[in-house]
Amino acid sequence: MAAAMEKSNINQIVVSEKKSWKNFFAYLGPGFLVAIAYIDPGNFATDLQSGAQYKYELLWIILVASCASLVIQSLAANLGVVTGQHLAEHCRAEYAKVPNFMLWVLAEVAVVACDIPEVIGTAFALNMLFSMPVWIGVLLTGLSTLILLALQKYGVRKLEFLIAFLVITIAICFFIELHYSSPDPREVLHGLFVPQLKGNGATGLAISLLGAMVMPHNLFLHSALVLSRKIPRSATGIKEACRFYLIESGFALLVAFLINVSVISVSGAVCNGSDLTPEDRASCKDLDLNKGSFLLRNVLGKWNAKIFAIALLASGQSSTITGTYAGQYVMQGFLDLKLKPWVRNLLTRCLAIIPSLVVSLIGGSAGAGKLIIISSMILSFVLPFTLVPLLKFTSCKTKMGSHVNPILISAFTWVTGCLIMGINIYYLVSSFINLLTHSHMKPVAVIFSGVLGFAGIAIYLASIAYLVFRKNRKATHLPESRNSQTVETLPRQDIVNMQSDID
């Protein structure tokens, strides 16, 4: 392992020139930081509702989203490894000022939308553990995140191990919950491999599940995290890096997938059990993170609620760290503006804490739970504006050279992307029509709202079409050598500094 990497300082990880399986340890880390986004409180909230309302029927969404996520995340990693630039930097180089600015705004919206469930989820966990009011927990979450970010000064490697430890902690907690709830394995397998989507409510929840799984900010994050390693810039070195990052991401996302399946299975088994009290059945109809914990406590014993709270706390705190990184890379990439992590974190904390605090004060835990679902849907609608540029860039030979996506991978990712966008558009149009037809507004107001709404949908579709059909114009000056002997490395100390400079 010592031969696999050497460190020029506490944060710099340099991969050995020799081709060896031991190099895998040098690449281990970014995948777990990315996987945290797949098991954050937003995922837990939608998972709980999915299991409570539809038992195991939407498990196939998790399977499909996880498989698609692995391929898409590997493309994001490949983009960074091959070109030496992350996704936001490519967007700044490729698009004109106005489109670039709009993409930056949408990326920031995605970061904030991701941050809201993390803030609320951590507040719920504090409420479960210490009976602390949700609004106080929201305020404390911002402070606790700043404290955790102080760990960065001890090196990115130690922070990656901390995140990996938190992921394993979350997994153990939910596997214990799964053991006690004892779902029927045959029903779980049926839900995983037999697609079904019954009713508009299921469609909305499916979109929330997709939004909570395939997150826009994660693509920016992954393409930048891989730049914290200095790899040999030879054809074999780049190929080895892409392969090891795929393996590492696959392992981390497998753990995240099993956790999500466990949450849905626990919720489905408990809320559809025959021994529920009328009070618990009422809770299952409008299940959120807070109610879910007390439901498990009532049915399975008080310690299971504590285990759930510990998992939720670990998830929320680790997610806020990775969300801060993503926001830093987004701002640096789109605007070439670098802020110290604590400043960037303070800004995103405020943007997430203000709506969370207002909703928790006015609507209580129920309102905060609904805000999590809304934020997940926002992420799903913003996704095309991150996914399409990624697919375009990684399928472009002038940007990726010999490492351009194979035809089969390009076809799979474009089909997957089109399906996600199609589901989003269908739900958007059908929900808007349903809102108009069942509203109590006057006919003139309905017509006016309809014109404005469909105009907004048209702009949304036109914007996606612009990204899809616009030809790439900027070629990437690949730092790759023409032979396999050179050991030139790509210096991205600025990326490392973002993960360590908190002074």
Image (cartoon, rainbow, N blue to C red):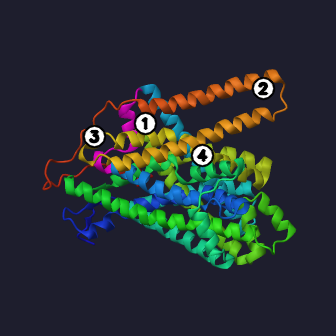
- Give me the C-alpha separation between circle 3 and circle 1: 23 Å
Magenta segment includes 91: yes
Does the CB distance between marks 3 and 1 fall below 8 Å?
no
- Give me the C-alpha separation between circle 1 and circle 4: 19 Å
In the figure, is residue 69 to the left or right of 277?
left
Within 10 angstroms of label 1, few (less than 14), some, or many (20 or more) residues? many
Snapshot quadrant of residue 294: bottom right
Residue under circle 2? 446
Residue under circle 4? 113
The amino acid type, in three-letter code, at marker 4 is Ala
> What SS does tag 3 mark?
helix
Task: Give the mark, 1 or 4, whose residue is nearer the N terminus.
Answer: 4
Snapshot quadrant of residue 243: bottom left
Magenta span? 80-96
Task: Give the mark, 3 or 2, whose residue is nearer the N terminus.
Answer: 3
> What SS does tag 1 mark?
helix
- The correct choice, above or below, for 499 with respect to 334 in the image is below
Residue under circle 3? 397
The picture places residue 400, in percent across and down from the top left corner, at 28, 43
